[in-house]
Image (cartoon, rainbow, N blue to C red):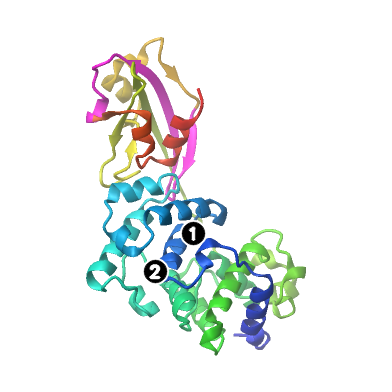
Amino acid sequence: MTPRAAGLASRVVRWQRQHGRHDLPWQQGRDPYSVWLSEIMLQQTQVSTVKAYYARFLERFPDLQSLAAAKEDEVLALWSGLGYYSRARRLHQCARVIAEHHGGVFPGTAAELMTLPGIGRSTAAAIASFCFQERVAILDGNVKRVLTRVLGFAEDLAQPRHEQLLWREAEALLPRDPAQMPAYSQGLMDLGASVCSARQPMCAQCPVQDICVAYLEGDPGRYPVKTRRLARKQVALWLLHASDTQGRIGLVQRPATGIWARLHSLPAFESQEALLAACPQAGAPAARQHAPIRHALTHRELELHVVSVRLRRGMAVPQDGTWFEGAAWRALALPAPVRKFLEAPR
């Protein structure tokens, strides 16, 4: 920690209390269930998107016990459209572990929280600092950006040893008074979200401008340093949008592993030839091939080719699928691009 950064904690706490975010729905009280749910939803997802999902999720599962007792399909259905469905599965698994092995009560330390499914170091620290005022550092994307700029931390975070070094720096900056931990942790996240943005940071509004190495160097965009970039594999899929004379849609449940695991989807094929072999009617003049849909996943870039066809009543859905009426398929857990396609006016 540089001598200049020694006063960081008190400045962040004061700024957060006056200028930070105080109207987020999960900030009302210090309930570990609410904080945990919001932290999982906020991973790789914008606050504006999460708010609506958070409200619907809490309405159906107001506490950990109700979530633990739910069926996975119901959890996935409420998560539908939020993406990164492994988060929902681990969330459900974690609720069951807490209910069965911890008496339905969240552990009170970050170290204990990290033993639970789907709770990593930063999420555990967020729950522990917000709810139990434990002196532990969080290090999500926003906080990494703030701290690397303040400290002038120029090591490559693509290397695990450098990320561990930043963790130690973050721990050294913690306020001494545990009562300040909620405001401090929230303040760092708020700064990263609203002031210390990745592009065009608003340094004039920053409470730590005069002790920020990146600002004094005149190059905030230099930080954080991370050389390794994710290379997404290009994958093309052909989707069969089959409807029948009753207006039902043919859907299949995906395998337990791979893309869109266990979600319901339009039948998917690796090629147009495979789709036509499974459903020759898709090659008829009345069938319609839509413009390709591009959708990014964490490790893949999907190019989806949707072919619409109307099948006669009584015909089976390829891949042992099932016919669903509108109200039924809307309640299923569907991949975001499939839901968007089905709900689009035609």
Q: Which percent across, then down, holds residue 274?
A: 30, 25
Give whichever of 17, 153 is nearer the camera.
17
Q: Which residue is mark 1?
A: 42
For the point 37% across and 33% down, the residue is 327
What is the crowding at mark 1: few (fewer than 14 residues within 10 Å), some, or many (at least 20)? some
Mark 2, secondary structure of its residue: loop
Lateral position of residue 330 relative to residue 345, left or right: left
Give whichever of 48, 2 is nearer the camera.
48
Mark 1, secondary structure of its residue: helix
Q: Is residue 191 above or below residue 286?
A: below
Q: CA distance from mark 2 to mark 1?
A: 13 Å
For the point 69% across and 74% down, the residue is 18
Q: Which percent across, then down, holds residue 40?
A: 43, 61
Give whichever of 321, 213 is nearer the camera.
321
Q: Which residue is mark 2?
A: 120
The kind of residue tagged 1 is Leu
Magenta run includes residue 295: yes
Q: Which residues are magenta?
A: 292-320
Give whichever of 338, 30 is nearer the camera.
30
For the point 55% across and 75% down, the residue is 185
The kind of residue tagged 2 is Gly
